[in-house]
Amino acid sequence: MPPPPPLAELHLHLEGSIEPETLCQIDPTVTPEEVRERYQFTDFAGFLEAYKWVVRKLNQPADYALAARALRERLAAQGVTHFELNLSVGVMVFRQLETRAILDALRAELPGVPLIFDAVRQFTPEAAVEVAELAVEYGAAFGIGGDEAAQPMAAFRDAIRRANGLFIPHAGETTDARNVWEAVEYGAQRIGHGIRAIEDPALCRYLRDQQIPLEISITSNVATGSVPNVEAHPVRQLFDLGVPIVLNTDDPAIFETTLQQEYELAQRVFSFSDQELAVLRQNAFEYFRTV
Ligand SMILES: [Zn+2]
């Protein structure tokens, strides 16, 4: 058997990638069973609670570095040769952690890995400006995550303007196509999730013509209830409409998935052929950010 082809991942959160064993190393007072229990939920609000719980375990630069090292080693073992990494910098700032020391530690642990600094939709626009300024300082892209319904993209226009044109937000995951339109109007180079684009044919044509990819995470969307069940996921229709698609895990530890499993899911549930899977794999390398 030839080795499996290399993979690249573009939408991956450090905080959501911490396996129970790694979290127990960071905080020896918790058990793997407790972590697995905390990673169970039935809707998006429950997911945010799980995410917040794990984030609160990360306090020191060494905690983040340990999580990054474990992730890097696991991805290498899984054949993921290239990855970009989302960091909830908005949360680090909000929690008044030593943000620069953490970012320096992460950069040392992950040389050459493009970073995306995420602001939080539920926090103030001013807080997002601070995240955007850090993104410029560290050569990272600026992103926005969290509860999409909290505020419109327009609330973050100052932060987006400061972010040096590198803008990769979450949009159209739990709300509507309008949110994706707003993201592209503000210059998004890629869209985290963006699955609601399927509700708007003109938007799908725009994404296709402008070659703006959607970072699709099937298991994540099912687990958070963003789609009612796996069969209802629009990945196949979006692909058939010519919208550029890349497959991702989003938060692999919380959603108990791997990138390889996402490709297998695309094949098994959505009948992607070997040639189509090769296109998806190639897309991830094509849209991988090299700046
Ligand atoms: Zn995400």
Image (tube, grey):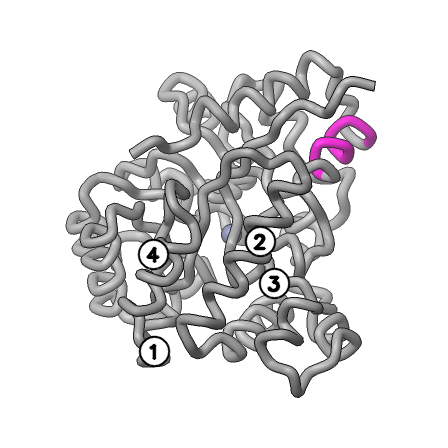
**Residue type highlighted by circle 1:** Leu
Q: Residues within 10 Å of mark 4 (few under 14, many from 20)?
A: some
Q: Earlier in the sequence, mark 2 or mark 1?
A: 2
**Residue type highlighted by circle 3:** Ile
| Magenta stretch holds residue 68 | no
User: Would you say the residues marked 4 and 3 are in contact, meaning their CB atoms lie under 8 Å apart?
Assistant: no
Decide: is 268 above or below 252. above
The residue pinned by badge 4 equals 152
Q: CA distance from mark 3 to mark 2?
A: 7 Å
Give the residues in magenta: 262-268
The residue pinned by badge 2 equals 71
The residue pinned by badge 3 equals 18
Q: Secondary structure at mark 4?
A: loop
Q: Which label sits in the foreground, 3 or 2?
A: 2
Q: CA distance from mark 2 to mark 1?
A: 21 Å
Decide: is 287 above or below 166. above
Q: Which label sits in the foreground, 2 or 1?
A: 2
User: Would you say the residues marked 4 and 2 are in contact, meaning their CB atoms lie under 8 Å apart?
Assistant: no
Q: Residues within 10 Å of mark 2 (few under 14, many from 20)?
A: many
Residue at 65%, 83% (x, y): give it: 28
**Residue type highlighted by circle 2:** Leu
User: Would you say the residues marked 3 and 1 are in contact, meaning their CB atoms lie under 8 Å apart?
Assistant: no
